[in-house]
Amino acid sequence: MIQKKDILKIAIDSPAAAGAGTLAKSISKYYNLIYLDTGKIYRLIALYKLKNPKKFNLNFIKKKIKNLEIKDLKNKKLLSDEVGMEASIIAKKKSIRKLIYSFQKKLAYNPPKKYDGSCLDGRDITYNIVPDADFKFFITANVKTRAIRRYKELKGLKKSVSFKEVLKSIKNRDKSDYNRKISPLKKTKDSLLINTTKLSKRACFLKIKKIIDRKINI
Ligand code: DC
């Protein structure tokens, strides 16, 4: 793959509901980077599976990925916990991960011309998709805080869920994402740990901005 030179590449990994998405979006906007929430791709495939269980096979997914556009990832249906859990299950399959690999790589290394780089978040971004990123972050928060955030988000979307269910689902997802054999979630040695438990969105943004500015302004 021919790679675009002189672009800023940011790679983020994080467990579910740690606030990485919000942070990645604000960072991307500030530095004019294309933002890809890679979890949404797994969620989209999970949604296809839930909607078309009979048609669901690798060929079906291949065709969908071939025509995939970033705007498809904005579908509100992708946000439910049911889709999130299914995404975590299908994400264990090597064959499915392989199909998504090139889409992510292409966007990370060859962002559209109008952008100055890329920012991807997910579970295997720092060591698998963008291993030579200029900045690598592992964003986390304690499990209760993450569950409270996800619960509020789902309530905002008028979903009828209890806090207990959300907490259980996040714990299950952690188990599935950290312990799987293929591309598990992990903090690499060269990633900076950002614990957002006690930080506001603004404080997280400023912390990361300071780290980036220190390096790119030299
Ligand atoms: O970030 P999220 O909650 O939207 O991700 C949904 C699931 O997709 C997550 O539980 C595991 C999977 N995923 C993955 O395996 N690798 C990624 N890079 C991103 C997400």
Image (cartoon, rainbow, N blue to C red):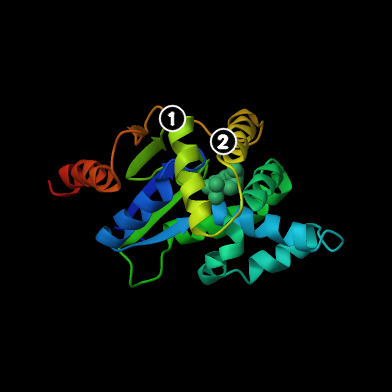
The location of residue 206, given as percent across then percent down, is 21, 46
Please report whichever mark, 2 or 1, sits nearer to the chain's N-terminal start.
1
In the image, is 3 to the left or to the right of 201?
Answer: right
Instruction: Judge by depth and name the residue closer to the eye, 59 or 16.
Output: 16
Q: Residue at x 69, y 67 (%)?
A: 64
Visible in this render: residue 121? yes
Amino acid at the residue labelled 1 = Asn
Mark 2 burial class by Cα count in 10 Å: few <14, some 14-19, many 20+? some
Q: Position of residue 23 (x, y in %)?
A: 35, 50
Position of 16 relative to 217 (above/below): above
Left or right: 59, with 105 as reference point: right
Kind of residue at badge 2: Leu
Determine which residue is flagged by label 2. 167
Q: Horizontally, is 149 left or right of 10 in the view?
A: right
- The mark found on residue 142 in the picture is 1
Residue 181 to residue 94: above or below: above
Residue at 52 percent across and 66 percent down: it is: 74
How packed mark 1 is, by other alpha carbons closer than 10 Å (few <14, some 14-19, many 20 or more), is some
Residue 172: which quarter of the image?
A: top right
Instruction: Please name whichever residue, 141 or 118, is drawn nearer the observer in this view of the structure.
Output: 141
Report if the CB atoms under discs 2 and 1 are less than 8 Å apart: no
